[in-house]
């Protein structure tokens, strides 16, 4: 190709042209953020109970597992308090 020539077309260069259809704008799911946070916190609470009830899950090299569950429950409750105060929800987003 010399300096004055145009670039070759996509077909000439061996590239395929693919048309992508327009997608509709996605709307947020009608789910309460607080409910999602509480469900996750409850799941970690169940994991904590199971970890404490089964000795092999909290002895030896796994002694840190219950503390992970405790930290997750504490962070979940802090997140739930944050959402309940009115922050962290999408209603005020533009």
Image (cartoon, grey):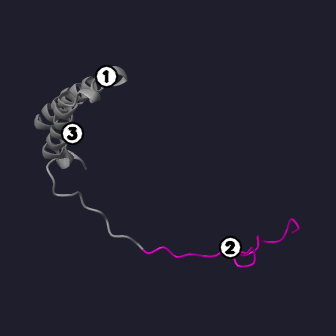
**Element at label 2:** loop
- The CA span between labels 1 and 2 is 54 Å
Of labels 1 and 2, the one closer to you: 1
Depth check: 42 or 77 in front? 42
Q: Which mark is residue 15?
A: 2
Q: Is residue 33 left or right of residue 10?
A: left
Residue 87 visible? The answer is no
Residue 67 visible? The answer is yes
Depth check: 49 or 40 in front? 49
Depicted 68 relative to depicted 93: above or below:
above
First in sequence: mark 1 vs mark 3: 1
Q: Residue at x 26, y 23 (%)?
A: 67
Q: Residue at x 23, y 57 (%)?
A: 28
Q: Which mark is residue 88?
A: 3
- The CA span between labels 1 and 3 is 30 Å
Query: x%, y% of residue 13?
Result: 75, 73
Query: x%, y% of residue 32?
Result: 14, 49
Q: Residue at x 23, y 47 (%)?
A: 93
**Element at label 1:** loop
Tell me the residue that label 1 is attached to. Answer: 64
Depicted 53 relative to depicted 2: above or below:
above
Residue 29 on the magenta segment = no
Of labels 1 and 3, the one closer to you: 1
- The CA span between labels 3 and 2 is 45 Å
Q: Is the Cβ of the residue at disc 1 closer than 8 Å to that at disc 2?
A: no
The magenta span reads 1-21
Image quadrant where residue 88 sits: top left
Number of residues whose C-alpha sits closer than 10 Å to that of mark 2, classed few (under 14), some (14–19) or many (20 or more)? few
Q: Which mark is residue 72?
A: none
**Element at label 3:** loop
């Amino acid at each position: 190709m010399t300096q004055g020539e145009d670039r070759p077309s996509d077909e000439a260069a061996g590239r395929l042209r693919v048309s992508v259809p327009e997608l509709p704008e996605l709307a947020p799911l009608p789910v309460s953020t607080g409910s999602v946070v509480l469900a996750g916190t409850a799941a970690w609470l169940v994991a904590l109970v199971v970890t404490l009830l089964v000795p092999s899950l909290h002895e030896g090299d796994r002694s840190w597992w219950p503390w992970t569950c405790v930290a997750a429950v504490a962070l979940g409750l802090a997140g739930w308090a944050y959402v309940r105060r009115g922050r962290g929800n999408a209603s005020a987003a533009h």
